[in-house]
Image (cartoon, rainbow, N blue to C red):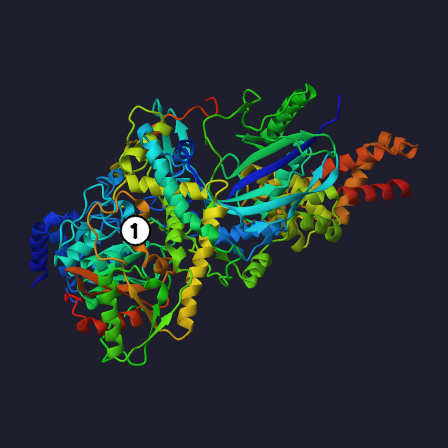
């Protein structure tokens, strides 16, 4: 069997997190009644004109800068002409030969190749089309134009990906960066992130093969799956001596198949030309610098700083930097005085399950830091602290107060401890004897007995020390 | 006269002028409503109840907007154009919607789906176009002023043919929001007036930056001109390319007389050259159709307008709707525009035309840089021609715009002033000014106007 | 430049225009006339035109939700509208669904 090299490029459309649409003042929100968020501009009524949204341009530039792309001082909106009922004007306003940004890269972890840098070809702004629903009325296609005109950034990768798994890793990193920078919500369920994939096979080092385009994948896992299926399909054709046809394929997740798309444009002659309704987008050096200054620390930088500055393991650093709210929370806990490694364990072990469930942290960073402090100074035991954490909730009761209320503050009063230790030694002569004659594991049993007497309030470390002193002395 | 009485008088005149076929929509109730609206805001606005006819490619909520096309028959816009809002705010009264070449594509108003407009002085002749209905109504004295639109001379040319004042402002001076797009980089809402002053008053009312039109530009307001005592200190350029040997003798005589008058009033006159003039019409007939082909893609029978092809599949519905809904000239221009943008032809046509446009614009800039304050040219190569004379040959029709299209490509303000008559037909003098120098242009026109004896025979 | 009836059919399809069989030849001829007329632009020296200077940038709109109101609802002007949707003939199946 001859070896084939897989070549994949991705086109990702993300909805920019604006309030209003790209060229009109309609709300860009998801889920309104059909044809509610429409106006003369996005309905393409006679005489209506587009005016671009400043925040859409800023978010597009921010995304580009986060990917290391060059934001161009002059970019141009163009008309992409084709007829389709989801396209009110008969053309889509997009950017063609002068996009907002070019270049840049996404660094992601490949299972086969380690850390790889995937080139970004370009990032441009464009308006979304409407939504079509077939047979909602029998024999008709229904059109909802709420989404028409919603701002999108299209991010096109170089054909640098070499496997479906890499494609998925690329998407993960891209999404992380775009969510981090507040550019987009990147929700595939809500349609705010969509992926088209190009794939071809070739002999290693040889010329590129004929590519096919895959559409209709509704999750990153499905992108990977569709690419795997299509890779196998192309491999079978090529191994059999056949030729791959250049087609657009629709992925069917239920059937696990890809099938050629029918019907859309009969021609791909889009007759692009600069939109005469829109002068060029001109961005000054100062504007671009300000957009760059607005960038938050990106996940990759944060991850390495968490390792170097906080001494976290690569794994912990990755987990804690994956989402900006988590990273910010972790750092707030540290800033409030907690030891970074301990804080990392608490955030990952205790705070994150709740966050992953409801998308927010119930216990404020300052209170968590306070609780960590109580463990550190021996006020409460670690297991007791976990109980306190569970009780902290969203209220504002201080951790120490909760521990006190629950009777979990450790007893370190020497006299009280001494009394319990003396009692336990007296009550368990057999075990004491066995310990003394060479069974050190019996210490744990004796500590347990003291703890039981204290009803969990004793500091086990102090108990253990005191027991040893007693046992060795007598 | 009260505003209500004025509205009534307009209604009478509209009824009497019906044979011109200049009007596509008007109604007494709508006129009464307009009058009431103006009375409420007070009649002391700058337009003080002036009735203004509106070309039917400017959208209005109260009257239909058809662009003289079957495809928009009965369409009523759910919003008003910015110029309509501004007109009303200034106390103007929307009198009626006027006939035009379908989607403003034409130079004779013969390409209307609702019949051609008659020239007020000779029903066998055309009033020019595409704003022929507005021009004819002003010429017939039905209204003192009207809105038209220019893409490549569609106000100046009919103004010259009909013997009224036609003012095209600088591109960006007046909002296009609500003007149905034809060639977006060229389209300008423009004004007809019985006099320079009437036209200037209306222009002043509608001009100004509009945040709804990204191509409109902030500028100081347009002033209603006060005639100067003379034209001393002003230099006028006569572009040699605008006086070809085959220029109609009547037109030449009219412009010569006007130039002599300029000199008599103390103005300096000298020849200038605009060497790329001969490329203007071909450039225009690449760029305007290319933009039009995209601008008219929205008329697909899906969201508004007339749908044809019941029972057919979607593509057939598109083709039937557009094939039956658009007239012959509109289809020709859509096809030309589609052709010049299609794969393999873009560089040969569209890119070349863009380059030519830059040169044409640079010609004007260079002329103005030599110290010329305004240019004087004939508005049209001939007076109004006979109906049907140019219908068989599209290119001959296009050449009726030979003196007006360069100005549109350069985005400059220009005006056509009645300059006498030849064999009973009006002649237009074109005054072209640098970008956003409308005030200078209007004041020159207002100075010349009382001396020009617009109805006098020039030969 | 010649434009054949076949060329015309291709362009008309891009523009979604029905052209009657009987009109094809006439229209192709007219188009050819117009296209050869504008073809005189090709005689223009193809050297780059003088630079137009720094372009004037578009004035961007603030990101506010303030749509231009509709005086009439889509149901009033749409050729076919039902329960808040514009309707067209059922499109050919795109996804087998
Ligand atoms: Zn809208």
Relative to A300, does residue B408 appear above or below in the rendering? below
Judge from the rendering whether residue B397 lies leftward or rightward of residue A166; answer left or right: left
Within-10-Å neighbours for mark 1: few <14, some 14–19, many 20+? many
B139 or B68: nearer the viewer:
B139
Q: Of all residues shown, which one is farthest toward the top?
A: A240
Judge from the rendering whether residue B342 lies leftward or rightward of residue A240; answer left or right: left
Q: Of all residues shown, which one is farthest toward the front?
A: B245
Relative to B324, does residue A21 appear above or below in the rendering? below
B312 or B63: nearer the viewer:
B312
Q: Of all residues shown, which one is farthest toward the right?
A: A437
- Residue B452 visible from this viewpoint: yes
Which residue is found at the position 67% from the left and 34% from the top?
A208
Judge from the rendering whether residue B398 lies leftward or rightward of residue B418; answer left or right: right
Q: In which quarter of the image is ligand 1?
A: top left
Percent from the top left, x then y, of residue A386?
66, 40
Image quarter where the N terminus of chain A lies is top right
Percent from the top left, x then y, of residue B371?
39, 75
Image quarter where the C terminus of chain A lies is top right
Q: Is mark 1 on a helix, strand or loop?
A: loop
A156 or A465: nearer the viewer:
A156
Number of numbered discs on residues: 1
- Residue C86 visible from this viewpoint: no
Q: Mark 1 points at which residue?
A: B178
Percent from the top left, x then y, of residue B53?
18, 55
Query: Which image quadrant for residue B137?
Result: bottom left
Relative to A268, does residue A101 appear above or below in the rendering? below
Which residue is found at the position 17% from the left and 73% from the top?
B450
Relative to B343, does residue A275 appear above or below in the rendering? below
Q: Which chain carries label 1?
A: B
């Amino acid at each position: 069997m001859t070896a084939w090299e897989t070549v994949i490029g991705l086109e990702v459309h993300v909805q920019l997190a604006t309030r209003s649409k790209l060229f009109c003042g309609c709300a860009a929100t998801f889920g309104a009644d059909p044809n509610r968020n429409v106006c003369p501009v996005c309905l393409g009524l006679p005489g209506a004109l587009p005016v671009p949204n400043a925040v859409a341009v800023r978010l597009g530039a921010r995304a580009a800068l986060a990917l290391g792309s060059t934001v161009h001082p002059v970019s141009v909106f163009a008309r992409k002409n084709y007829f389709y009922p989801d396209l009110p004007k008969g053309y889509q306003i997009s950017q063609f030969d002068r996009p907002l940004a070019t270049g840049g890269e996404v660094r992601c972890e490949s299972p086969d190749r380690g850390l790889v840098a995937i080139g970004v070809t370009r990032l441009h702004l464009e308006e979304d089309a409407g939504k079509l629903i077939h047979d909602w009325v029998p024999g008709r296609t229904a059109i909802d134009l709420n989404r028409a005109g919603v701002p999108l950034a299209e991010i096109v990768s170089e054909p640098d990906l070499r496997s479906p798994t890499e494609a998925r890793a690329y998407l993960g990193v891209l999404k992380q960066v775009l969510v981090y920078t507040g550019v987009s919500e990147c929700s595939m369920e809500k349609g705010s992130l969509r992926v088209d994939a190009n794939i071809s096979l070739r002999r290693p080092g040889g010329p590129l093969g004929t590519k096919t385009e895959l559409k209709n994948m509704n999750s990153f896992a499905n992108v990977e799956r569709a690419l795997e299926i299509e890779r196998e399909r192309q491999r079978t054709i090529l191994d059999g001596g056949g030729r791959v046809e250049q087609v657009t394929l629709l992925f069917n997740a239920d059937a696990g198949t890809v099938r050629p798309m029918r019907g859309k444009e009969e021609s791909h002659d889009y007759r692009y030309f600069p939109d005469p309704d829109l002068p060029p987008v001109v961005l000054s050096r100062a504007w671009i610098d300000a957009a760059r200054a607005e960038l938050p620390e990106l996940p990759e930088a944060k991850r390495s700083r968490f390792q170097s500055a906080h001494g976290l393991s690569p794994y912990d650093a990755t987990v804690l930097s994956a989402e900006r709210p988590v990273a910010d929370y972790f750092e707030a806990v540290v800033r409030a005085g907690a030891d970074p490694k301990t804080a990392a364990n608490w955030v990952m072990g205790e705070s994150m399950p709740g966050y992953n469930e409801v998308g927010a942290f119930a216990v404020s960073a300052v209170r968590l830091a306070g609780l960590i402090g109580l463990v550190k100074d021996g006020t409460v035991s670690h297991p007791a602290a976990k109980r306190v954490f569970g009780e902290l909730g969203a209220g504002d009761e201080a951790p120490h107060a909760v521990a006190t209320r629950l009777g979990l503050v450790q007893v370190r009063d020497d006299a009280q401890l001494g009394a319990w230790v003396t009692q336990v030694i007296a009550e368990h002569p057999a075990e004491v004897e066995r310990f003394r004659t060479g069974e050190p594991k019996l210490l744990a049993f004796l500590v347990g007995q003291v703890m039981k007497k204290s009803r969990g309030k004793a500091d086990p470390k102090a108990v253990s020390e005191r027991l040893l002193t007693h046992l060795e002395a007598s | 006269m009260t505003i209500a009485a004025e509205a009534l008088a307009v209604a009478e005149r509209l009824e009497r002028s019906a044979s011109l076929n200049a009007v596509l929509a008007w109604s007494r109730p709508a006129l009464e409503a307009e009058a009431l609206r103006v009375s409420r805001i007070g009649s002391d606005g700058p337009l003080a109840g002036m009735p203004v006819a509106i070309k039917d490619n400017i959208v209005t909520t109260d009257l239909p907007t058809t662009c003289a096309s079957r495809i928009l028959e009965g369409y009523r816009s759910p919003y008003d154009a910015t110029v309509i809002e501004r007109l009303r705010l200034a106390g103007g009264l929307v009198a009626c919607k006027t006939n035009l070449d379908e989607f403003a594509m034409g130079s004779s108003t013969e390409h209307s789906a609702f019949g051609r407009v008659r020239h007020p002085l000779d029903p066998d002749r055309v009033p020019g176009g595409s704003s022929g209905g507005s021009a004819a109504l002003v010429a017939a004295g039905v209204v003192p002023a009207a809105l038209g639109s220019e893409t490549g001379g569609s106000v100046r040319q009919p103004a010259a043919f009909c013997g009224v004042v036609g003012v095209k402002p600088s591109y960006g001076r007046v909002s296009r929001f609500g003007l149905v797009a034809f060639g977006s980089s060229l389209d300008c809402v423009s004004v007809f007036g019985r006099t320079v002053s009437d036209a200037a008053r209306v222009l002043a009312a509608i001009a100004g930056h509009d945040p709804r039109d990204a191509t409109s530009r902030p500028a100081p307001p347009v002033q209603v001109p006060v005639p100067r005592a003379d034209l001393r200190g002003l230099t006028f350029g006569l572009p040699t390319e605008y006086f070809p040997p085959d220029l109609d003798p009547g037109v030449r005589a009219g412009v010569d007389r006007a130039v002599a008058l300029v000199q008599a009033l103390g103005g300096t006159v000298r020849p200038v050259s605009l060497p790329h003039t001969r490329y203007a019409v071909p450039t225009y007939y690449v760029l305007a159709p290319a933009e039009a082909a995209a601008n008219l893609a929205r008329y697909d029978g899906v969201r508004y307008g007339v749908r044809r092809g019941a029972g057919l599949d979607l593509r057939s519905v598109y083709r039937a709707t557009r094939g039956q809904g658009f007239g012959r000239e509109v289809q020709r221009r859509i096809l030309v525009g589609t052709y010049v943008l299609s794969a393999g032809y873009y560089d040969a046509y569209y890119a070349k035309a863009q380059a030519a446009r830059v040169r044409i614009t640079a010609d004007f800039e260079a002329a103005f840089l030599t110290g010329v304050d305004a240019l004087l040219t004939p508005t049209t190569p001939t007076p109004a021609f006979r109906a049907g004379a140019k219908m068989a040959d599209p290119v001959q029709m296009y050449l009726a715009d030979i003196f007006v299209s360069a100005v549109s490509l350069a985005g400059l303000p220009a005006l056509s002033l009645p300059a006498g008559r030849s064999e009973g037909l009006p002649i237009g003098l074109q005054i072209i000014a640098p970008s956003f120098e409308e005030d200078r242009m209007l004041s020159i026109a207002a100075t010349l106007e009382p001396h020009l004896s617009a109805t006098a025979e020039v030969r | 430049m010649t434009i054949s009836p076949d060329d015309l059919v291709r362009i008309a399809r891009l523009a979604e225009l029905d052209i009657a069989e009987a009109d094809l030849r006439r229209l192709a001829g007219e188009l050819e006339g117009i296209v050869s007329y504008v073809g005189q632009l090709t005689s223009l020296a193809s050297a780059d035109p003088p630079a137009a200077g720094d372009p004037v940038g578009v004035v961007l709109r603030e990101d506010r939700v303030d749509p231009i109101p509709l005086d009439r609802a889509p149901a009033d002007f749409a050729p076919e509208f039902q329960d808040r949707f514009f309707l067209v003939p059922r499109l050919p199946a795109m996804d087998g669904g």
